[in-house]
Image (cartoon, grey):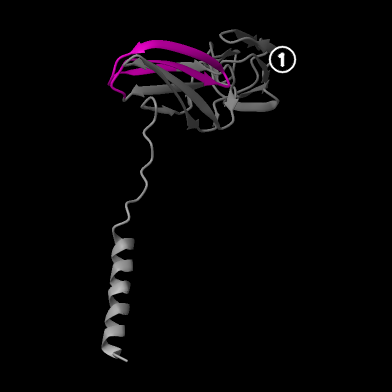
Amino acid sequence: MNVSRIIGAVLSATVMVGTGVALAAPASAAPPAVNTVASAKTECDRNTERAILPVYVLNRDSAPIDVRVTTPYGEVKQSKIAPGKAYYHRFDTGRGSVAAGTVTIAAYKFQNGKGFYATSTAAFNASSCVVDPRLDTRAVDSDRDGRINAVSVRNVGAHTIQARISGVAGSTARTLAPGQTFTVADRADRSPVAVVTAYKFVEGKGYFTSRTVRP
């Protein structure tokens, strides 16, 4: 038996198998039917204390596209977005707090006599935009004796509040819509300090503010 010939054959087979594995080409992913990229991220509108959801869609395709953007807070459509151009829309959620979620982007193009359609998603973060009652308070000492003659409170927030002024002329409460003011005068002119509190209840949650005011 020729041992060297057998060993040579085995080595040759091993090299061929190894070479075959090394030259195998990896499978490539198919390109999207319509090439877009999208992003979404919640932010707060301080004036309204509501969450806003901006959505951005960029056309990375070689042809104009039509898109439909669907969110938990509404849907919009835009036609003929040119290649390299983007569409931007801000959804007002109508809510002070929103949970994390996803936006769906459906894109369509007509190219070379054929229609192409693709969908994708973009995730957005949870956000809470409601804050404690915002107040503008003022204590007046008209006779400059160090004691309060009147206290005013104005609701400068986005929601109706229950406001209370204590320490001058007892304790007085009012319901104040955004922008409204109420004033309590103390004709006895006895107190050097007053306390203003405010409460509101929004989307199942309570918010509270307390402020000490002096002349």
Q: Does the segment drawn in magenta span residue 57?
A: no
Give the image quarter of residue 150: top right
Q: Quadrant of the N terminus?
A: bottom left
Q: Is residue 27 left or right of residue 175?
A: left
Regarding residue 198, the answer to whether it shows in the image is: yes
Query: Which of these two is toward me, 99 or 168?
Result: 99
Regarding residue 157, the answer to whether it shows in the image is: no
Q: Residue at x 51, y 33 (%)?
A: 125
Q: Is residue 65 left or right of residue 161?
A: left
Give the image quarter of residue 62: top left
Classified by dominant secondary structure, the portion drawn in magenta counts as strand
Q: Residue at x 71, y 15 (%)?
A: 173
Residue 177, percent across and down? Answer: 62, 9
Residue 89, percent across and down? Answer: 43, 16
Establish if 16 lies above or below 148: below
Query: Which of these two is toward me, 120 or 99?
Result: 120
Number of residue marks:
1
Query: Which of these two is toward me, 212 or 81?
Result: 81
Query: Which of these two is toward me, 12 or 133?
Result: 12
Please state the extent of the stretch shown in magenta in the rendering: 61-89
Please state which amino acid type lies under the numbered disc 1: Thr
Provide the secondary structure element on which disc 1 rests.
strand
Q: Does the segment drawn in magenta span residue 73?
A: yes
Q: Residue at x 47, y 23 (%)?
A: 105
Name the residue tied to disc 1: 172
Residue 107, percent across and down? Answer: 43, 20
Residue 61, percent across and down? Answer: 31, 23
Q: Residue furthest front?
A: 1
